[in-house]
Amino acid sequence: MGNAESAVAVETTLGGWSARAEGFTVLAVTGPATTVLIDGRGAGSHAVLGLRPGQVIEVLAPPRGLRNYIAVRGGFAAPRTLGSASTDTLSGLGPPPLRAGDLLAVASEAGGWPVQTFVPGPPPAPAVYELQVRRGPRFDDLADPRVLTRVRWTVNPASNRIGVRLDAGGSDTAPRHRPDLPEQSSEGVPLGAVQVPPSGQPVLFLADHPVTGGYPVAAVLTSQAVDRAAQLVPGDTVRLRF
């Protein structure tokens, strides 16, 4: 869109977003490949789209993946907290989530026009998502840390922007703490932390994760793996790879 990196975009979860243009508007929809409609007709994602006053754009749920991103030339005008216009679901900081009827004003953070007006979308989602991880600071707090990479994990419905909870499919295969592990004090945890609570259901910490935690961080997702984890939906199959 030729916007500054600080320009505000809109994040959708499983589609369900629509807006009516009140003026001439230029937009683009990225993230997983999805259906974009303008006045009910297919317009395609990952391309520059123009709206005339009164036209309606709709972003439907992607066949695979979770979150799409809508950018408007100039960026959306939104209040910022600590430099961010995101809604932090854990702390409550930032503006509230969008609601039906909200008016989205356009800011003035546009620069030169981009060279390309269309880019290929991401490749088709795999049957099994492989997420690369590095050893975490509490790797050795697990009785068998390598079980993290042996299990085919399933994404639990109790997942959100705070973290993705994984199920092992059987208590006998879930990772366990060392039996001699003392009670751990809370300590700082990074974006992408793979925290293992006593239940054996690892949690992959995403954008709204807490800054401290009291369970072992046995591994940490790479930055690319964090992006992929943010697109996981309940029922997806995941493998962790060191």
Image (cartoon, rainbow, N blue to C red):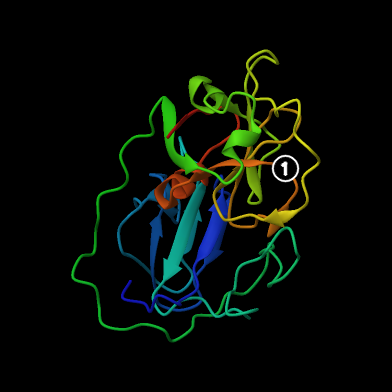
* In the image: residue 126, left or right of residue 203: left
Residue at coordinates 57% horizontally, 37% vertically from top-left?
139
Farthest residue toward the left? Answer: 115
User: What amino acid type should be assigned to the residue bearing mark 1?
Assistant: Tyr
Other residues around mark 1 within 10 Å, as few (<14) / some (14–19) / many (≥20): many
Among the 4 quarters of the image, the one containing residue 110: bottom left
Quarter the N terminus occupies: bottom left
Farthest residue toward the front? Answer: 180
Residue at coordinates 49% horizontally, 26% vertically from top-left?
149
- Vertical arrangement, residue 82 with respect to residue 150, above or below: below
* In the image: residue 48, left or right of residue 164: left
Residue at coordinates 41% horizontally, 80% vertically from top-left?
74
Q: Is residue 61 visible?
A: no
Residue 161 placement (x, y as % from top left): 63, 51
- Vertical arrangement, residue 196 with respect to residue 137, above or below: above
User: What residue does disc 1 label?
Assistant: 215
Q: Secondary structure at mark 1?
A: loop
Quarter the C terminus occupies: top left
Among the 4 quarters of the image, the one containing residue 72: bottom left
